[in-house]
Image (tube, rainbow, N blue to C red):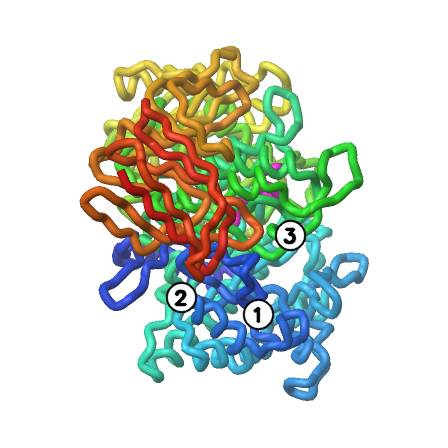
Amino acid sequence: MKRTILFSLVSAFIFQACSVPQQDKSDKQDDQPREKTAFQTSNPWKPVIDVRADVAIVYSVKDHHEKGGMSFEERVQTWRDKGYTTHFMTGIAWGEYQDYFTGEWDGEWHLDEGQVTQKGDTIWHGHMVPYIVPSLNFIRYMKEKVIKRVIDAGIDAIYLEEPEFWARSGYSTAFKKEWEKYYGFEWRPQHESAENTYLSSKLKYHLYYRALNECFTYAKEYGKSKGMNIRCYVPTHSLVNYSQWKIVSPEASLASLPCVDGYIAQVWTGTSREPNFYNGNKKERVFETAFLEYGSMESMTAPTGRKVYFLTDPIEDWPRDWADYKKNYQATFTAQLLYPMIADYEVMPWPNRIYQGLYRTSADSEEKKHIPRFYSTQMQVMINTLNNMPLSDNKVNGSEGIGILMSNSLMFQRFPTHEGYEDPQLSNFYGQALPLLKRGVPVKTVHIENAPVANTWKDVKILVMSYSNMKPLDKTAHDYIADWVKKGGVLVYSGRDDDAFQGVQDWWNQDGNSFKAPSEHLFQKLGLEAQYAAGEYSYGKGKIQIIRNDPKEFVLNENNDAQYVSTIEKLYKDETGKALEFKNNFALTRGPYEIISVLDENKDQTPYTISGKLIDLFDPEIPVLDQKKVLPGEQSLLFNIGSVKNPDKPQVLATAARVYEEKFEENAYAFTAKSPLNTTNVMRVLLPGKPTSIKVTDAAGNDVAVESSWDSGSKTQFLSFENNPEGIQVRLGW
């Protein structure tokens, strides 16, 4: 009983999210510098990694030779000296905390606080760096040794990243102690029953919820004592990825904590290339997975007004070749831009490994080289585009209003499995999403934890849900779902409700409830009578469609999603009066930018064609095209010159450097361009007429070699020269 009460209290606190005020999307106050773009690094400033985003997030407080022989404070100052706003990041589940583990801090040995598997193996993140069971003592260490020092260094934004508890762990002495404190009875091995697995996952979830709440609350209180407003963020993988990778994390519940200001959505090639099933075929679907990952982070934060940075990475943790990195970077980069209500970005993590790392030159070669100039140039064009990427009220093309319900408990049933229940590659989630997404329907995700928040239901016409792979953590959510249906919403419930987790001891079968499955409680709220058979029902102004198949059945077998799709198609037509649009592409206009992705595995293999005066931003030569064709399986990012609001004003339209100090004269335009050393800049500049003089000089006034050409059709001047973080001065006269 203690278990139920404790977790209900946490859930009740989560549901206070409805009272959270909306925050300024720009995160820019009059007394605060611009914080639209950021990157993270453990290194001091170096000319070869001078990315020129707004914020340098300095990683780790540890002082050692790998950080240039500098203290943490000295590393921070090197970035400030170059004009950066500085923030701080470190891991909450792992990090360079050897002084804690070896007893240097408090005289006690703490390596036994690592996460341990059934075999007795500690799960390591690095040498003497275990994944942590975050005890209250470790939390105290984080406050005293890390957070206090960071705030004393004058940093007012703290990121505690990746609160990760591996599902396969849960066997350490430290975890058993936390179990007994939390539940009030002896630890139970999670592999012995679904009940134990669910209990274990709930505790893992709670421990990092507590850790972040404690650390961030302390940060804000200590900062306030020094007259500082400390902002606290959680860089985290998406709920989609953590569920697929079998990791437990607090995720959506953190958005209700007053001490949490936002997130970084850690989505990149490494997460999005995790294979999934569609049409009976298991393979990587990087764009589609990234689209759903970013969507789950957007839907997690938007209703509660939290800020979220979208992250992409030009490479990934796993060593591959440059062509592979480039292809998948374009896919994830495009996916993030298709969310026009998000315009804050972590443009890259770890620039040192991107600019100075050695990776294979091709998939079939072991030869390794630094990043090719064509890729570094393209990458810099892309990240400098993010500095100007606007928010937009435009929508991705396609039929809107279809949501897929998610819950944090997606992470609870992943490992181990019980009684023959399997959910290969998270197919019960993808089975709801991919049959529609692959037909060009821009489905969104909806977090059940945000059910009390009015904005959660905005624009949702059809909600697809299943309790085959998740369970509602609080019964209150069903009141909000039922109210939404009563007012005219259409609910599609798909599931057999026969998995082993339906019978775990929780609110739907305790304290006077005797439901065999949580869906029965929902159906009762919707006025339905047992046996809750497949079919269509009415409730108020809305409808309920019950499908007695687990969603995984729609994707694990070839050509097995037709009935599911036709059901959604009919309901959409009945609800909106419009046909559900099937196509093979997603496209969005954001200001002057055209963002396009064309789907493969679609009956329609027609390229997407767009015409105009278009700068191809995925081409390192940034050519001006009159027409662009995007083939199935490809993406494109274009600058539409015809969308420029002030075409008579000289301006840089595309560049692989950041532009500063613009000067406008009667017949001249001048500016300074900055970007990392050992990289090439390309620029396309809109001018009133063909320039009669072009002068390019370095910071010392020396002439710089430049390639240039004039495109009369677009009235743009192309320039290319070597970058320098100290600045290259450009003056164009006509």
Q: Secondary structure at mark 2?
A: loop
> Considering only order in the chain, which callout, 1 or 2, is on the residue closer to the N terminus?
1
> Within the image, what quadrant is residue 537 found in?
top left
Residue at 33 percent across and 27 percent down: it is 400
Give the label, 2 or 1, closer to the camera. 2
> Within the image, what quadrant is residue 270 found in?
top right
Residue 406 seen? no
Mark 3 highlights which residue? Answer: 197
The answer to whether 233 is drawn above or below residue 270 in the figure is below
Q: Which residues are magenta?
A: 265-273
Q: Secondary structure at mark 3?
A: helix
Residue 355 seen? yes
Mark 1 highlights which residue? Answer: 60
Question: What is the spatial separation of the Cα atoms under label 2 and label 1, in whole angstroms?
Answer: 20 Å
- Residue 492 belongs to the span the image colors magenta: no
- Residue 267 belongs to the span the image colors magenta: yes
Return the x and y of residue 727 as percentages of the image width and height.
43, 57
Q: 571 left or right of 422? A: left
Amino acid type assigned to the residue bearing label 2 in the image:
Gly
Return the x and y of residue 708 as percentages of the image width and height.
43, 35
> Considering only order in the chain, which callout, 3 or 2, is on the residue closer to the N terminus?
2
> Within the image, what quadrant is residue 383 found in?
top left
Question: What is the spatial separation of the Cα atoms under label 3 and label 1, in whole angstroms?
Answer: 34 Å
Q: 274 left or right of 40? A: right
Q: 94 left or right of 27? A: right
Numbered badge on residue 83: 2
Residue at 31 percent across and 53 percent down: it is 305
Binning the other alpha carbons within 10 Å of mark 2 as few (below 14), some (14 to 19) or many (20 upward) gives few
Numbered badge on residue 615: none
The answer to whether 597 is drawn above or below residue 375 in the figure is above
